[in-house]
Amino acid sequence: MNEEQRNAMASGRGFIAALDQSGGSTPKALKLYGIGEDAYDGDEQMFDLIHQMRSRLIASPSFSGDKVIATILFEQTMDRTINGEDSAAYLWKQKHIVPFVKVDQGLSEADNVIDGVQLMKPMTKLDSLLERAVGKGIFGTKMRSFIHEPNEKGIDAVVEQQFEYADKIAARGLMPIIEPEVSIHSPDKPKADDLLVAALHTRLDTLPDDRQVMLKLTLPDEDNLYAPLIAHPRVLRVVALSGGYSLAESCQVLSRNHDLIASFSRALTEGLTAQQSDAEFDAKLASNIEDIYVASIT
């Protein structure tokens, strides 16, 4: 593991940019960017367009390691280039931004919600993906589960599955980001948050002394709810996802939670469009980055 990158993740001032939309969420991301589904034919063209968007964002002058500590990439982004250089290498060498990659293969189907949660699909490609990630200089990984309801059995199952895969990822020398997202539309989100914090704390206590993970969690309803997780010796960093809140709402809540930093996706790209000039695009991106950065260091 790259110690310079580890130190940046442990104590860097700033936030993580989440640019890891997969096939299912890409059409929505492109639509928000001003590219409708009638502008492309099939997945290949769709992924070419989303890579152009991500490349434009990453290569923009305002997107730098001064305020963006790390970026989570989609697998295809990791395998492509930005300005002629491997994406992960470009991020670290040109921008001094730590590269991560999304490794999950999506959630169980929506009609397969058991005990109020959606577990991750079995990761049948994990070994080969981790091998490629190590070869390309990726620092860590991210994987997402989804919690609909405050069901203790379901939440325990989500946490157990996440940590089982985290063990395999850590064995390859990579830093796992565990993301058990709680729906902002949960019928009792505060209870779900509480159950998740308890389950995570219990599982963290079982990790060996030389192991750490990162946690990516939905912005909490109760301020500083994640303080015990942030202070846990087995946790390198706790980051927050925007979960459907607007940029303004996300930053407002984040700023009330000390030592919690952002890992925003849609909120980061809010208001960015393909139709903007490069100067307009970078000005809006700079404004978004500044808002998220200030909320992350408050």
Image: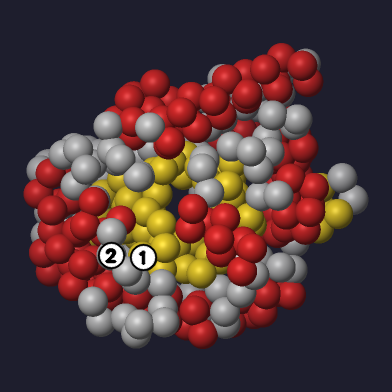
Locate residue 197: give its quadrant: bottom left
Q: Position of residue 172 (x, y in %)?
A: 57, 82
Q: Position of residue 118 (x, y in %)?
A: 29, 60
On screen, 232 above or below 72?
A: below
Total numbered labels: 2
Q: Residue at x 18, y 72 (%)?
A: 202
Q: Are marks 2 and 1 in contact (CB under 8 Å)?
A: yes
Left or right for 129, reference 263: right
Instruction: Look at the numbered disc 2 and give the secondary structure of its residue.
Output: loop
Left or right for 190, reference 179: left
Left or right for 170, reference 197: right
Residue 38 appears in the picture as rendered: no
Q: Residue at x 39, y 21 (%)?
A: 248
Q: Position of residue 147 (x, y in %)?
A: 25, 54
Instruction: Look at the numbered disc 1 and give the secondary structure of its residue.
Output: strand
Residue 140 appears in the picture as rendered: yes
Q: Position of residue 209 (x, y in %)?
A: 35, 82
Q: Amino acid at mark 2?
A: His
Locate residue 32: give its quadrant: top right
- Residue ID for mark 1: 235
Q: Amino acid at mark 1?
A: Val
The label shown at residue 72 is none
Who is closer to the viewer here, 141 or 6?
6
Coloring basis for residues:
secondary structure
Q: Residue at x 80, y 47 (%)?
A: 94
Q: Residue at x 36, y 39 (%)?
A: 243
Who is closer to the viewer here, 43 or 13?
13
Quadrant of the drawing holding the C terminus:
top left
Q: CA distance from mark 2 to mark 1?
A: 6 Å
On screen, 152 above or below 298?
A: below
- Residue ID for mark 2: 232
